[in-house]
Image (cartoon, grey):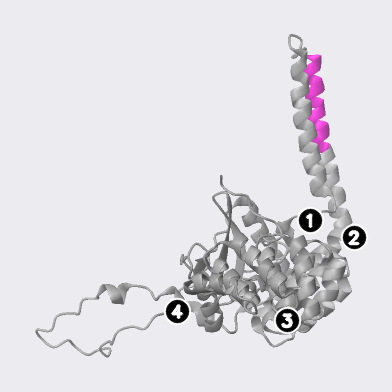
């Protein structure tokens, strides 16, 4: 288990103190603080006050590693009149966006678990129980699905897999145990064997699809989870995982239909409504997205209400960028600025040519032209209607944004 430092320091209990004004008896020495008294509270101390449990894939060596972070609320924003609240949130997002672009945004979770240890899956499950009011993203729930893997029974599972009538359950148990020790390919092979042994088992396709989803095999995961949803209608985890797989495949229309079945106001269903609103936003269904986010905002859950406000601001920015007058004006100004910069570069090139700067080596004249073309192409891409990950949510610490997560936009490994 890897622990990170948190931004929020909570007051810890102080040792017994003498009442103010009372003198210390003669001969009594002041008590020395022990290392235990000086040490900060353990990270698990923050779990009941956690804001969210978010799971991502992070670069690790030549591959990726599952990491689950526990976040607490950041500093509270200053109170503002209700009329100025939306504008204030947009300004706060703009400042955060600038800090992110400059690499100056320093926020760390109070606790972090990663899959380098076998205890990872159980630790995430325990954290979920210790933080019942925290936002739970679907990927954390997918990790919890494998928390019961029993690695001590791997030899028994292998023996039982050869016995008629017990093969499906044995292969399932073996697959979950393999997931626990990080042998994901072997786990997927075990789940496939379980599907061959009993293709109508209620869990085999669900476990297979979720394990594939955790390794970015979204197309295969969608096929397996489609069968799981057909065989187990009403299974919240399987149906949500199918919606997430279609979301990652950018099949937003079918993802929308699937996520409407699991959308709700709290817990995993709250994440389903948030995902649904994101699908609608990406399809430019602005009013429908606002309707879903309005339901989430008034659900009575304070953390999901904060997510809804973040997403409402994101919907407003997207609508302005793609079709609003403010977006058109901004694109026009950016286009004129880019063309002006390109014209200035062209003037410099022609001036250099007139001065016979490249008389001896005329091929070098192509170098500044190539640089000029790259700059212009980059500027025009920024002016286009395409949106980058940094333009979506991420308004406050610990609030999930499904378009900014590494599941949608993988991070590059250091190597």
Magenta extent:
340-355
Q: In front: 179, or 162?
A: 162
Please name the residue shown 29% across and 84% down the image: 15
Callout 4 secondary element: helix
The residue that label 3 is drawn on is 236
Residue annotated with mark 1: 387
Question: Percent position (x, y) of residue 26?
Answer: 10, 86
> Distance of mark 4 from mark 3, alpha carbons?
30 Å
Q: Secondary structure at mark 3?
A: helix
Indicate yes or no whether the magenta region holds residue 239.
no
Of label 1 and label 4, which has the lower sequence position? Answer: 4
Judging by the rendered image, the residue that carries numbered circle 4 is: 45
Disc 1 on helix, strand or loop? loop
Mark toward the viewer: 2 or 4: 4
Residue positioned 57% across, 75% down in the render = 160
Report which residue position mark 2 lands on: 325
Cα gap from disc 3 to disc 2, whole angstroms: 41 Å
């Amino acid at each position: 288990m890897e622990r990170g430092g948190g931004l929020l320091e909570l007051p810890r209990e102080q040792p017994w103190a003498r009442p103010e004004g009372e003198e210390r008896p003669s001969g009594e020495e002041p008590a020395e603080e022990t290392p235990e008294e000086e040490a900060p509270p353990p990270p698990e101390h923050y779990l009941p006050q956690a804001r969210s449990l978010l799971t991502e894939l992070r670069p690790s060596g030549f591959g990726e590693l599952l990491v689950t972070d526990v976040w607490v609320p950041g500093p509270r924003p200053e109170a503002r009149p209700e009329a100025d609240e939306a504008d204030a949130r947009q300004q706060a997002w703009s400042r955060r966006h600038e800090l992110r672009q400059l690499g100056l945004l320093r926020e760390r979770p109070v606790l972090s678990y990663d899959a380098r240890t076998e205890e990872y899956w159980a630790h995430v499950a325990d954290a979920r129980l210790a933080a019942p009011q925290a936002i739970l993203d679907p990927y954390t729930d997918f990790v919890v699905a494998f928390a019961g893997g029993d690695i001590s029974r791997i030899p028994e599972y292998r023996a039982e897999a050869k016995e008629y009538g017990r093969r499906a359950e044995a292969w399932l148990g073996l697959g979950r145990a393999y997931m626990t020790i990080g042998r994901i390919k072997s786990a997927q092979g075990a789940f496939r064997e379980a599907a061959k042994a009993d293709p109508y088992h209620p869990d085999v396709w669900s476990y297979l699809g979720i394990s594939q989803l955790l390794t970015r095999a979204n197309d295969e995961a969608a096929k397996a989870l489609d069968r799981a949803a057909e065989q187990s209608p009403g299974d919240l985890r399987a149906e949500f995982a199918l919606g997430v797989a279609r979301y990652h495949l950018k099949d937003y229309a079918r993802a929308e239909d699937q996520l409407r079945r699991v959308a709700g106001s709290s817990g995993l269903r709250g994440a389903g409504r948030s995902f649904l609103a994101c699908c609608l936003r990406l399809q430019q269904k602005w009013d429908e997205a606002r309707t879903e986010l309005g339901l989430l905002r008034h659900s009575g859950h304070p953390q999901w209400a904060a997510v809804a406000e973040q997403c409402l601001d994101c919907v407003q920015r997207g609508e302005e960028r793609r079709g609003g007058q403010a977006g058109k004006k901004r694109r026009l100004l950016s286009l004129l600025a880019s063309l002006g910069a390109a014209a200035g570069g062209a003037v410099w090139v022609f001036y250099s040519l007139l001065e016979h700067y490249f008389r001896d080596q005329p091929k070098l004249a192509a170098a500044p032209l190539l640089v000029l073309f790259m700059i212009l192409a980059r500027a025009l891409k920024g002016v286009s209607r395409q949106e980058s990950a940094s333009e979506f949510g991420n308004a406050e610490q610990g609030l999930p944004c499904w378009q900014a997560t590494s599941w949608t936009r993988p991070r590059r490994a250091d190597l």
